[in-house]
Amino acid sequence: MVINDITSMSDVEYCVDMYISLAGNDIMPVSRQESLRLFINLARRKKFIKVLRKEPSSPIIAWLYADVVKLLHCDYLVFQQMYYASDQSGISAYKCIILLHDEMYEYAKETAARYCISNGSPIDESNVFARSLEKNGWKRKHFMAYRELPPGAQKQPRQDSSLGSLESVFSRP
């Protein structure tokens, strides 16, 4: 199996269509046009989007998008899987999960994140996704799989002083 970056508009369309076909349209309506617009923007900004193929010229069988996120309840950054899709089943599906998440973890070491996090799917009631990662060395809490990044591996996060003091934010005229 081969891991690559997004290389073409047809890759973008394939990934979006794969996700839409798996996610369905029954709970929340999905906009293919909006999905394409946002996905193209992420690809242009060189965000972490990886595709997996059986051979270099074969169709995409899985893809993953992850990004650095500052959760409201944490004083540190995490590198979190935002989207994952695969049209595989059985052992092939397991291999896709492991290969793309290994790539994600290696990349996360170069970020300012403290943890690498992968949330499961709401349709995965047995947490098979997170359990697959757990078998490969990740820790798991219900639907979420996570790995702490090695100390010192992270870049130092940017200090944001744009909020100023809390008094100025919440004061009334």
Image (cartoon, rainbow, N blue to C red):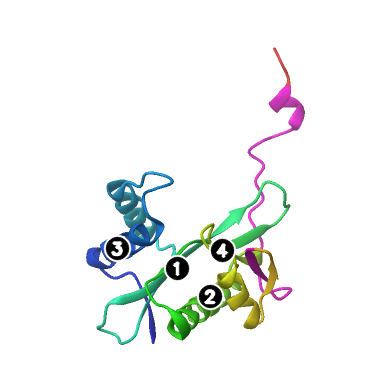
**Can residue 29 be seen at all in this image of the molecule?**
yes
The residue at 69%/34% (across/down) is: 164
| Place of residue 167 in the rendered image (x, y in percent of width and height, measured from the top left) | 76, 26
Image: 48 above or below 98: above
| Disc number for residue 64 | 1
| The C terminus lies in quadrant | top right
Q: Nearer the viewer's eye, disc 4 or disc 2?
A: 4
Of label 3 and label 2, which has the lower sequence position?
3
Q: Nearer the viewer's eye, disc 4 or disc 1?
A: 4
Are the residues at dot 2 and dot 1 in contact (C-beta closer than 8 Å)? Answer: yes
Q: Amino acid at mark 1?
A: Leu
Magenta extent: 143-170
| Dot 1 crowding, Cα within 10 Å, few <14, some 14–19, many 20+ | many
Instruction: Tell me how far mark 2 sits from mark 1, CA to CA.
Output: 8 Å
Of label 4 and label 1, which has the lower sequence position?
1
Which residue is the extreme one toward the right?
167
Kindly identify which residue carries mark 3: 12
Element at label 4: loop
Side (left or right) of 43 relative to 153? left
Element at label 3: helix
| Place of residue 43 in the rendered image (x, y in percent of width and height, measured from the top left) | 36, 61
Q: Amino acid at mark 2?
A: His
Are the residues at dot 3 and dot 4 in contact (C-beta closer than 8 Å)? Answer: no
Are the residues at dot 4 and dot 1 in contact (C-beta closer than 8 Å)? Answer: no
